[in-house]
């Protein structure tokens, strides 16, 4: 089976790519409802459930794709998928913002948990940039920044959980603020059924990511688009579809905190794609095996996340065209990155 997929012809690669896209999109739709109910059923709250459970589950396809690409000695595809995914998922928040008509989404969903997750994401992205610019030192072909990413992520989650238990400050409540209130219907649902459904949907995302890497590699090679473009602008978008679907679905369900937490928490988890890919890549430090246009996405993701945090702190109630200034700025950053990537030799 693996040999057949490795020699996949282009005429089969495109249908496989589309099929994986559909599976990822459908699974992501149902995951929102499951995680929202689990957040109420377990008492975790939307911010933590969105960041940890929804963020990790919706990121599985991207994680599997990046690790598979690194194992197959395709570091550019692995890193462009990981870094492009963080940027496009931040962009997806602007789409969720457009679907919420009452007020600016960043205003309504502002919470201490989301701000903490955003700060953690900035730290992890900065570490990736440090790895890219630091000397190419490795131990067993793994760069020293890789374990720091894992430790930093786990420590950051602990801090987020502690601030939820003992918050030192809270965002001001306004008429547009949507509080995280447990749904009475979710409390009556079977925990076993919810966890089982969560596991099945998460597994389908993982398998889809593995198949997607095979088709994406063939497309990059046979069409001449290159691994950078295919990874950052195609697989990154496809593997990030669950974040788009879940964010829009969460907004429509009134779970605004979950919508934002799923994106920010998913982005924080996605930085571990880099760590996992570095371990899987046997050619040395994967941080130094990527071209500058792909590394640019780290800086852009830092900028987009910082803009998002400023938006949640400023809390603009209503901007032009029903979206806030941060959404306009994030769209501009992403389009700039895409243009640079397409025009790079």
Image (cartoon, helix red, strand yellow):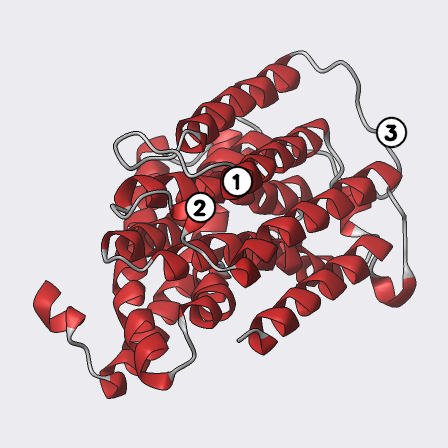
Picture coordinates of residue 303 (x, y %)? 71, 48
**CB-based contact (under 8 Å), mark 3 and mark 1:** no
Q: Measuring 47% from the left and 62% from the top, which residue is drawn there?
A: 236
Left of 48 or right of it: where is 230?
left
Choose the circle earlier in sequence order: 3 or 1.
1
Real-space Cα separation, disc 3 to disc 1, in angstroms: 34 Å
Q: Which mark is residue 128?
A: 1
Q: Measuring 43% from the left and 29% from the top, which residue is drawn there?
A: 150
Choose the circle earlier in sequence order: 2 or 1.
1
For label 2, the residue is 287
Disc number lying in front (2 or 1): 2
Left of 289 or right of it: where is 300?
right
Picture coordinates of residue 89 (x, y %)? 58, 55
Q: Is residue 317 above or below residue 170?
A: below
**CB-based contact (under 8 Å), mark 2 and mark 1:** yes
Picture coordinates of residue 121 (x, y %)? 60, 37
User: How crowded is the residue under tag 1: few (<14 C-alpha within 10 Å), some, or many (20+)?
Assistant: many
Q: Could you tell me which secondary element the residue under label 1 belongs to?
A: helix
Disc number lying in front (2 or 3): 2
Q: Quadrant of residue 204?
A: bottom left
Q: Measuring 66% from the left and 28% from the top, which residue is drawn there?
A: 116
For label 3, the residue is 172
Q: Measuring 90% from the left and 48% from the top, which residue is drawn there?
A: 317
User: How crowded is the residue under tag 3: few (<14 C-alpha within 10 Å), some, or many (20+)?
Assistant: few
Residue placed farthest to the bottom in the image?
A: 11
């Amino acid at each position: 089976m693996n040999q057949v997929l490795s020699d996949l012809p282009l005429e089969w690669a495109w249908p496989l790519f589309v099929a994986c896209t559909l599976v990822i999109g459908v699974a992501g739709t149902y995951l929102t409802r499951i995680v929202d109910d689990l957040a109420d059923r377990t008492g975790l709250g939307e911010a933590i459930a969105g960041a940890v459970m929804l963020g990790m589950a919706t990121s599985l396809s991207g994680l599997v794709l990046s690790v598979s690409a690194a194992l197959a000695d395709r570091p550019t595809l692995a890193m462009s998928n990981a870094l492009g995914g963080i940027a496009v998922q931040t962009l997806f928040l602007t789409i969720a913002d457009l679907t919420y008509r009452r007020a600016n989404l960043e205003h309504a969903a502002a919470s201490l948990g989301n701000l903490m997750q955003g700060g953690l994401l900035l730290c992890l992205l900065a570490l990736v940039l440090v790895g890219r610019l630091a000397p190419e030192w490795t131990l067993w072909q793994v760069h020293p920044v890789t374990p720091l990413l894992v430790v930093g992520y786990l420590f950051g989650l602990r801090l987020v959980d502690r601030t939820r238990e003992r918050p030192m400050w809270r965002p001001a409540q306004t008429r547009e603020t949507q509080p995280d209130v447990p749904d009475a219907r979710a409390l009556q649902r079977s925990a076993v059924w919810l966890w089982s459904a969560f596991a099945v949907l998460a597994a389908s995302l993982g398998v889809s990511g593995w198949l997607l890497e095979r088709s994406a590699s063939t497309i990059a090679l046979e069409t001449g688009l290159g691994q950078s473009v295919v990874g950052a602008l195609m697989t990154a978008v496809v593997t990030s579809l669950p974040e788009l679907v879940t964010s829009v679905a969460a907004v429509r369900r009134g779970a605004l905190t979950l919508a934002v937490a799923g994106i920010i928490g998913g982005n924080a988890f996605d930085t571990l794609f880099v760590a996992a890919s570095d371990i899987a890549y046997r050619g040395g430090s994967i941080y130094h095996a990527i071209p500058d246009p792909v590394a640019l996405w780290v800086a852009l993701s830092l900028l987009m996340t910082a803009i998002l945090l400023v938006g949640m702190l400023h809390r603009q109630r209503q901007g032009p065209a029903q979206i806030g200034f941060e959404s306009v700025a994030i769209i501009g950053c992403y389009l700039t990155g895409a243009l640079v990537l397409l025009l790079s030799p």
